[in-house]
Amino acid sequence: MAFHQAGAMIRLFKVKEKQKELAENANGGSPIKKQTAGELRLHKDISELNLPKSCSISFPNGKDDLMNFEVSIRPDEGYYVGGTFLFSFQVSPTYPHEAPKVKCKTKVYHPNIDLEGNVCLNILREDWKPVLNINTVIYGLYHLFTEPNYEDPLNHDAAAVLRDNPKMFESNVRRAMYGGHVGQTYFPRCM
């Protein structure tokens, strides 16, 4: 008796699968992709963004790819005032349990951003918590430009100059932002 019921259940599942397949084909093809929990959370985060006026967000792959986007930051104070810095965000399907991967696409002379665009921001590493969101990360990046930190550097040369000679650091930042060399490294214009 139990075997007969199990067989009926399997047939029922197959019938339901066939009905779903027929409905999808009738609607013109591919089924609607189910969003992951990470996509749902990211959609919520993006809809609730409250960015400073000096920051903007764009979706180079279109609105269908929320998991990859860019943020542009134009600091309105500090050493980097007037520059425009572009960051790429790659968000994992396991977000918010995993921090987004953030890279600076603009080559910048900065103690907390190396020449490959890696960013040293505590909330992107050991201090990430699922209660944090994209808004928090963008404000953290903005803060790196208004208050660069020489105590936790990725670019050790820039950090040493900031620590030992802030006037020279300011001059180096300006030279780099206008498109020039700092030491042996060339920086494209970002003003």
Image (tube, rainbow, N blue to C red):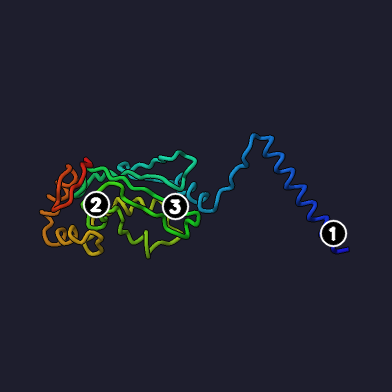
Residue tagged 2: 146
Local crowd at mark 3 within 10 Å, few (<14), some, or many (≥20)?
many
Number of the front mark, 3 or 2 = 3
Spatial distance from mark 3 to mark 2, Cα to Cα? 25 Å
Q: Residue at x 42, y 54 (%)?
A: 133
Local crowd at mark 2 within 10 Å, few (<14), some, or many (≥20)?
some
Residue tagged 1: 5
Quarter of the rendering occupied by the C terminus: top left
Q: Name which quarter of the figure residue 99 lies in.
A: bottom left
Of pointers 3 and 1, the one earlier in the residue sequence: 1
- Where is 26 relative to 163, above or below? above
- Badge 3 amino acid: Val
The one nearer the camera, 134 or 65, is 65
The one nearer the camera, 103 or 171, is 103
Residue tagged 3: 91
Spatial distance from mark 1 to mark 2, Cα to Cα? 68 Å
Q: Position of residue 46 (x, y in %)?
A: 44, 46
The one nearer the camera, 148 or 5, is 5
Local crowd at mark 1 within 10 Å, few (<14), some, or many (≥20)?
few
Q: Position of residue 58 (x, y in %)?
A: 39, 40
Spatial distance from mark 3 to mark 1, Cα to Cα? 45 Å
Quarter of the rendering occupied by the N terminus: bottom right
Name the secondary structure under disc 1: helix
Of pointers 1 and 2, the one earlier in the residue sequence: 1
Q: Name which quarter of the figure residue 126 lies in.
A: bottom left
Q: Is residue 75 left or right of residue 29?
A: left
Q: Residue at x 76, y 52 (%)?
A: 13
